[in-house]
Image: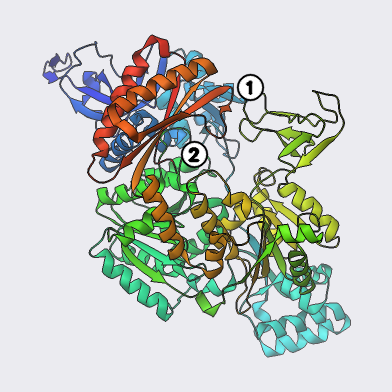
Amino acid sequence: MLEFNETNGIERKTLFIEVILPLAIPKTYTYRVPAEMTRAIAIGKRVVVQFGRAKIYTAIVYQVSETPPELYEAKYIIDVLDDEPIVNDFQLKLWKWMSDYYLCHIGEVMQAALPSALKLASETRIILNHSTEFDKSELSDKEFLIIDALDIQSELKVSDISKLLGQKTVFPILRALFEKNIIIISEEITEKFKPKKKSFISLHPQYKDSENRRALFEILERAPKQLELLLAYFKLEKQQTEISKPDLLEVSGSGPAALKTLIEKEIFIQEDKVVSRLSAEELEILHDFKLNDAQEIALGEIREQLEEKDVVLLYGETSSGKTQIYIRLIEQMLLEDKQTLYLLPEIALTTQLIERLREHFGGQIGVYHSRFNDNERAEVWQKVLKGEYKMILGARSSIFLPFKDLGLIIVDEEHESSYKQYDPAPRYHARDTAIYLSYLHGARIVLGSATPSLESFYNAKIKKYGFVTLKGRYGGVKSPVIEVVSIAEETKRKTMQSHFTTALVNEINAALSRKEQVILFQNRRGYTPVLLCTTCGFTPKCINCDVSLTFHKSSAKLHCHYCGYKQDVLHACPACGSTRIEQKGFGTEKIEDELQRIFTDAKIARMDLDSTRTRNSFQILLNDFEEGKIDILVGTQMVAKGLDFGNVSTIGIISADSMLNYPDFRAFERSFQMLAQVSGRAGRRAKQGKVIIQAYDTSHRIISQVIRGDYEEMFDTEILERRNFHYPPLYRLIQLDVKHKDLSKLALISDSLAKVLRSQFGDRVLGPEAPLISRIRNYFIQTILIKVEKEGVSVQKIKEALQQILRNFDSQPSNKGVYIHIDVDPY
């Protein structure tokens, strides 16, 4: 198609572009490019388009052609936002693969992939950045109008700014303000996670001279407290290279006032430094460190196997020194001038590791996770795009970054469920997506874990992945002693103290007497999960979800952990009027409360979702625990994902049965992983730790396997059951959650859908069945599960047939109001 250019009379080809919109629509959409923008168009650039009647969006150019759409007249694009593409070809291929594999729309992938600051839409909020100083006189008239409006109103939508300026496209103006750091473009503003800092004391250089030092002693003879501090400093100087402020005050026995005086007199210099929270035996990775024999062998095997295999599983027990091996592999990538992606399940829990790697690799390392605000995320995106960062350390969302020359991906703690995105779509698994990303770049990938997922271990067993083991804890640290105690026996003998057995109470007392710390694990937050009227059996439930309300003592309210609904605690049964209401079960809040009654002098704290909601609360909690301000830390699974603390000698698992009896085919695998990971927190340097596991079923095979550290036996038993009952890793699962507000209509529709699926896929289809929680946020749920064998069947053809069935289903008017969530690999 040709278009006449009035300026120079030359006929120019008209371009049409396929764009990805950040919406859940099945296809890309075609737009026409005005002649004056033809030269600016390129795949991967952002363009401003109108979609629907009045909505304006930022879209990504997916394809460029000269072919107009057949079924509709293409609208013109409004503007081209970028000088250079912000999304590269590798990313577009990854988005397309994710869309096909996870059965979602490519627009949903784009929505998850791009930072909010890079995908402006009519409803996007604009906020003034008060931390930036600027001169209003240097702004253009339109920029001044926007800033003036933001001074009056705290936030504006893009659609509000369009009305204010009287023009449809305001994106170039907003981009200019964003690049000057004057505005923040975001759906939600979060504060950057701050590292831990510690004060260190050093002697002023002038007192290195012996004569000046003698004169200093004479001056301080009249100030005994200050002299004691000086003598303590010289004593510590012989033992350690850096002297912390707390160490100096403890050894000298002096108070902060004397130290403050010496700093004011410029005898001492105080400097605040970022420090790690990892145990001391790992500190060598900051400087020139040497691998031990086991690590050297493992590193050699990894390099050798990466020559033949794209993926290698590193199976190394907790504290075996996997991080140092990763560093050696990253160093090799830097020598080859290639990029590395280091994935972690919980970025917030490993801030100290980030700081350590930054100190080792300097400015070449970038960090990408949800605790950064959108301006910061957009900045990291641009730096990766320009190749300024050779290494990215991030959570699952960092797989979306615009890598150009990716050479290595490390997936640390690859078994962690945090790598799985559950809602909204795309419901992807970062580990599996990273494997495809490495294939696109021709990169290599190392999966590391002390308790690998059954999928990864199975793939290593069948030689699909390389396999390397790393045995023994780093520095010769002994594995903890694990003791199992029967709750049933102690309850029978009436020796239980609240929820604690005699053995656990004795171990806690012994640890506290030695000035050591204790971690207690209970994987349920809140105070009491169920309130029960003993007269009529009434239990308060959420008004929006089919789940009982959990009592939280801190708020004195009943909470729903699914939709956030709250109500006042009951003092009388609303059904029968009885005041005989009992609390059943216990969570971390109740454990904390009961501990305080038993160990009255101990300092006790709690680490769960409720206690770490506020800004920097997690950081403060870790700081206090590391500095010995907390004796006993009670926590949910967060403590299993945390880091080893040098002074923790005792671990208590309050109720192992709650994990083992969970109705899920992965319950035993997850229980083994959780118990083994929590147990790995006990023990300090050369001293052996102690783990107390409380359970009713003390002879359970998983508990026995954890005690022996026998992962392979657990794997062999589980894989046999998975084979017999058609579960991963031998079968693939596709889960359909059918949702509707009317239960009777949902039952008819889900039955009808299941019949159509069975006609196509036979006995691979199970359900529909109500899940464990059958109503959430007023939507009733029915689950249909499709099990697809990996051998002899094309999973892709199954997915294509499923998509066609669901398209036909959606097109029927009788199915209006029904939502279907598709989850491929729901684990």
Q: Which mark is residue 152?
A: 1
Q: Is residue 277 visible?
A: no
- Residue 238 location, x and y as percent? 65, 86
- The answer to whether residue 214 of the structure is visible from this angle is yes
Residue beneath label 2, please?
375
Q: Residue at x 43, y 30 (%)?
A: 767
Location of residue 747 with respect to 291 vertically, above or below:
above
Disc 1 from disc 2: Cα separation: 22 Å
Left or right of 690: which side holds 448?
A: left
Name the residue type under label 1. Answer: Ile
Q: Is residue 118 left or right of residue 131?
A: left
Regarding mark 2 in the picture, which secondary structure is present there? helix
Q: Indicate the position of residue 788 as horizontal and vertical percent values.
A: 32, 39
- Say whether residue 756 is left or right of residue 261: left
x 55%, y 62%: residue? 676
Observer-nearest residue: 557 or 463? 463
Above or below: residue 680 compared with residue 607: below
Q: Where 525 sits versus 75, above or below? A: below
| Mark whose residue sits in front, 1 or 2 | 2
Which quadrant of the view contains residue 569?
A: top right
- Residue pictured at 53% horizontal, 71% vertical: 282
**Quadrant where the N terminus is found in the figure:** top left
Left or right: 606 as drawn, with respect to 79 = right
Q: Position of residue 679 (x, y in %)?
A: 59, 64
Q: How many marks?
A: 2
Closer to us: 324 or 500: 500
Instruction: Name the colouring of the figure.
Output: rainbow
